[in-house]
Image: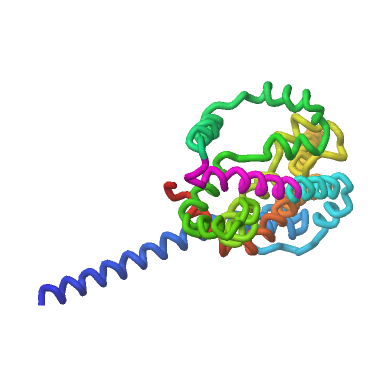
Amino acid sequence: MSDKRQNIINAQSDKLFTILNYIFLLICFLIVIFPLLNVVSQSLSSPRAVVSGEVWIWPVEPTLIAYKRILTSTDLLMGFYNSAFYTFFGTIINVTLTIMTAYPLSRKDFYGRQFIIAIFVFTMMFSGGMIPTYLLVRDLNMLDTRWAMIIPNALAVWNVMIARTFFQTTIPVDLYEAAELDGASDTKIITKIVLPLSTPVIAVLTLFYAVGHWNSYFSGLIYLNSKDLLPLQVVLRNILAHASVLEEMISAQTKEKTELLALVEVLKYAIIVFASIPVIILYPFIQKHFTKGIMIGSLKG
């Protein structure tokens, strides 16, 4: 009877823990989802409703005026194109270099790999700094070019370590040996064996690099001068900075909120949503591989 009673107590404890867990997760969900809904609702509401503070979760007097202004802005569309360009080609280069670096480092028969890994890890703790990096980009004649947004960040050591660990823990050594006995070269092993079995970690690398490129702000700020090359985040920064100046000018000249000031407020929220759309679209396609890839790739190798 004591064992049965203990089992009942354990079952009740597990049930209580599950309930508390769901309550906690629900609270976390509400904390996260409310600001997101608020931003989207503000961007879809009329300027008058936004300025008067009537918008909370649902749009008030729904309108697409802010998005129409964004789609007619040549600066925003050019910034969107530039960020898409940097994200697409930059991610391809990033993932390619990461796999090419991680694969040999994952092979235990690769001579000197521990020394090379130590050098990579050293760069994670110590870097040349912003000024030496800027001087290097300048000496390579990459200032004010698209390459300045791609080449300096072409490889992330942390992602190399994730991919290396994934290869070590997921792909059996016997598979490599069997392929080599059949006469397969390293190139064929990568293309025919490693890549088909590495979909989860490739999804992780793609998401990490793509989000990094899309949100890239500082590199564009210090390396680019041409208006036609600026990424979306820098364009948004310039627009919001001008909007803040405009708000101060309007507030200084008139005490009541004008229609122009109200439109500026709505545009701020619409710009946030507009800049987040590509990442929101990308994530569902690789979400199913993301958790598996990050968990396996983070294990000790």
Say whether residue 201 is left or right of residue 45.
left
Residue 56 seen from this side: no
The residue positioned 56% from the left and 45% from the top of the image is 104
Magenta residues? Answer: 89-110
Q: Is residue 155 above or below residue 276?
A: above
The image quadrant of residue 281 is: bottom right
Q: Is residue 113 magenta?
A: no
Residue 139 seen from this side: yes
The image quadrant of residue 39 is: bottom right
The residue positioned 85% from the left and 57% from the top of the image is 68
Q: Main secondary structure of the magenta part?
A: helix
Q: Please state the horizontal and vertical placement of residue 8, each as a whole percent of the image.
A: 21, 74
Q: Please state the horizontal and vertical placement of residue 243, each as a whole percent of the image.
A: 78, 40
The image quadrant of residue 182 is: bottom right
Q: For the view shown, which residue lies furthest in the left direction?
A: 1
Q: Is residue 250 above or below residue 282?
A: above
The residue positioned 81% from the left and 56% from the top of the image is 67
**Of 297 and 85, which appears nearest the observer?**
297
Which quadrant, please, contains the N terminus?
Answer: bottom left
Q: Is residue 105 magenta?
A: yes
Say whether residue 33 is left or right of residue 63.
left
Q: Please state the horizontal and vertical placement of residue 268, each as a whole percent of the image.
A: 74, 47
**Of 20 and 300, which appears nearest the observer?**
300
The residue positioned 73% from the left and 56% from the top of the image is 43
**Of 179 and 87, which appears nearest the observer?**
179
Q: Is residue 27 above or below residue 242?
A: below
**Of 199 and 221, which appears nearest the observer?**
199
